[in-house]
Image: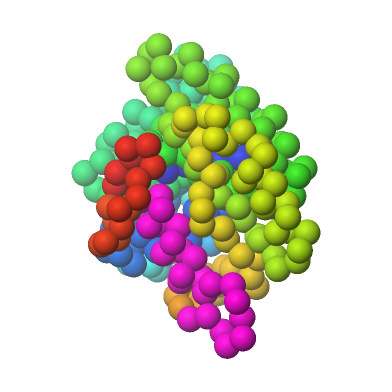
Amino acid sequence: MRITVVSTKGGVGKTTIAANLAGFLADLGKRVLLVDADVQPALSSYYPIRCESSGGVFQLLIGGDTENVISRTVLPHVDLIVSNDPTGQLPNLLLHAPDGRTRLRYLLDRFDDSYDFVVIDTPGSLSALQDAAVLAADLLISPLPPEMLSAREFSRGTIAMLERLRPMERMRIPVPPLAAVLNRIDRTRNAAEIASTVRNELFFGSASQIRLLETAIPNLVAYREAATLGIPVHLYEPRRPAGRTSPSALETMESLVRELLPATIPGASRSFDGVAA
């Protein structure tokens, strides 16, 4: 299964969600391939690499190389295709290629037998590279900070991007369902009110392929500290500290995966538009 973390707004936490989702799935025994399709290669350095390949996402997308692009991270079961396009050529090259927006989808077919999940991080702006990552996915996740500017950008940018890609369905390339997740929720009353407004007053209920998850990700220092150490946050904070009301990182990640991918956790029954692991 392929999961793309996407937003047309930068700085909303895409890389953190992609890395920690991969780490949690790997801890469940799943084989995970991370693909860093962002020209700002934060995901490429999130987990230490123990065996670096000679190529990366540039060689994958431009040369069609699937043999020399897999780096091994220190995490068991987590491999990585690094971002290696420092001059930002990929979006323009894909824009002018006849198959630019569909190329990643078909190249990833070659990894189907090697991995249970492919998790793709994306640039925070509209581009042919972002389009390619969206069309390569079975499921989209979009982080949504609990403030109205981000909610409006989600409506204006991310949803508009999905609608722009709808004509690809005539080529039997569906636009995947999207799950929005409230991210960096703090404990102030204002944040709670905005989160409630986002849940109740925006458009999520009217679009069958868009859903706002019940799981919300707290704004905790544990996520930053785990990233600094290069370990999944659920391993860094497996228990809720005494006196804190917000869930531990382990509780949050388990809730997120249980809601998104119920087949991966025994006893989970919820599903997202029929998508299964």
Q: Is residue 222 above or below residue 3?
A: below
Residue 198 forms part of the magenta stretch:
no
Which residue is outermost to the front? 200
The spot of residue 248 in percent (x, y) is 52, 74
Pick whichever, 125 or 83, lies toward us.
125
Residue drawn where x is 40% and y is 50% of the image: 260
The spot of residue 131 in percent (x, y) is 53, 28
Pick whichever, 37 or 235, lies toward us.
235
Which residue is outermost to the bottom? 242
Left or right of 51? Residue 122 is right
Left or right of 167? Residue 53 is left
Q: Is residue 149 above or below residue 165?
A: below
Residue drawn where x is 59% and y is 48% of the image: 143
Pick whichever, 133 or 192, lies toward us.
192
Left or right of 115? Residue 143 is right
The spot of residue 172 in percent (x, y) is 35, 17
The spot of residue 11 in percent (x, y) is 69, 50
Pick whichever, 33 or 59, lies toward us.
33
Residue drawn where x is 56% and y is 21% of the image: 163
Quadrant of the rendered structure where residue 3 is? top left
The span shown in magenta is: 239-261
Q: Does the image show residue 63?
A: no
Residue 248 forms part of the magenta stretch:
yes
